[in-house]
Amino acid sequence: MIALIPHSWLNAFAIPPWIWNPLSISLRAALEATVVVTVAGVALGYLLAKGRFPGRGAIETVFSLPMALPPTVVGYYLLTRLGGPGPIRDAEVHLFGHPLTFTFAGIVVAQIVESFPYCMRFSRAAIAGVDPRFEQAARAMGLSRWRIALFVTLPLARRGVIAGIAMAFGRAMGDFGATMIISGSAPMATTMPIALYNAVFYGSHEQAMVLALVQVGVALTILLGVGRLGRVRPW
């Protein structure tokens, strides 16, 4: 397992590498996935909430599939599409020099797919619930559509949007099935859930207990922080 931070830092905080390495990989992958999911999920949620066009329901259904499918099924399709022969794999080799399967980037892709529906659906519901009278008043003041979206609609929908982002981050942090299949448990791609599975599989029950407690602590911290953030009033 590779060391992701200086050993002096680990010694200073007394964090053993078998905890910190998978934790840092999980945090980094989940953060990168959440950045992509936030931009794309909020944008699509806004489009679904405000747009009136044919196929809107079908689009939401397709992008929501990972919520209903077992993560192993999602991982299987990602593995065969990203790693199997075809134009997608050819594009990966052309851009990155190698397929994305069994790499850290592959984990980020898997977590984007798994967490995207949560941000999209929460954002859509929150944006659809904004009182249209506020938007009408802003429109009467001469604000453009994108200014209304940025300075009126999204601030008013912030709690639902933040909840969706938090759920997406938590889903990315906690994903096991799709991440396990796409990464193959490679050392540089061992996340916390995979490390916990390995500890249980090899009989390291004390390590498994600590890894599980760390993940519970991270989840509680995220939820408490998001709860406070959601109560902050917009400027």
Image (cartoon, rainbow, N blue to C red):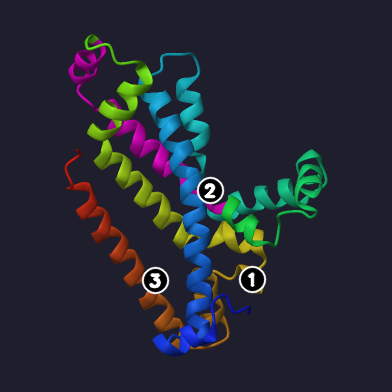
Magenta range = 110-139
Magenta residue check for 231: no
Q: Which residue, given by chain and number where applicable, does mark 3 sit on? A: 215
Check whether the beta carbons of the residues at disc 1 and disc 2 lie within 8 A of each other. no
The mark tally for this picture is 3
Q: Is residue 118 above or below residue 224?
A: above
Give the main secondary structure, helix, strand or loop, of the magenta stretch.
helix
Quadrant location of the N terminus in the rendered image: bottom right
Q: Is residue 167 left or right of residue 159?
A: right
In the structure shown, which secondary structural element does the residue marked by tag 1 occupy? helix
Checking the image for residue 188, the label placed there is 1
- Residue 47 % position (x, y): 42, 24
Give neighbour class at mark 3: few <14, some 14-19, many 20+ (Cα, 10 Å): some
C-alpha span from label 1 to label 2 = 18 Å
Quadrant in which residue 124 is drawn: top left
Residue 68 visible to an observer of this rendering: no
Q: Residue at x 82, y 44 (%)?
A: 90
Secondary structure found at label 2 = helix
The CA distance from mark 3 to mark 1 is 19 Å
Determine whether the residue tagged by mark 3 lies in a helix, strand or loop: helix
| Residue at numbered disc 2 | 112
Percent position of residue 128, x then y: 29, 26
Dot 2: few (<14), some (14–19), or many (≥20) neighbours within 10 Å? many
Residue type at tag 3: Gln
Q: Nearer the viewer, mark 3 or mark 1?
A: 1
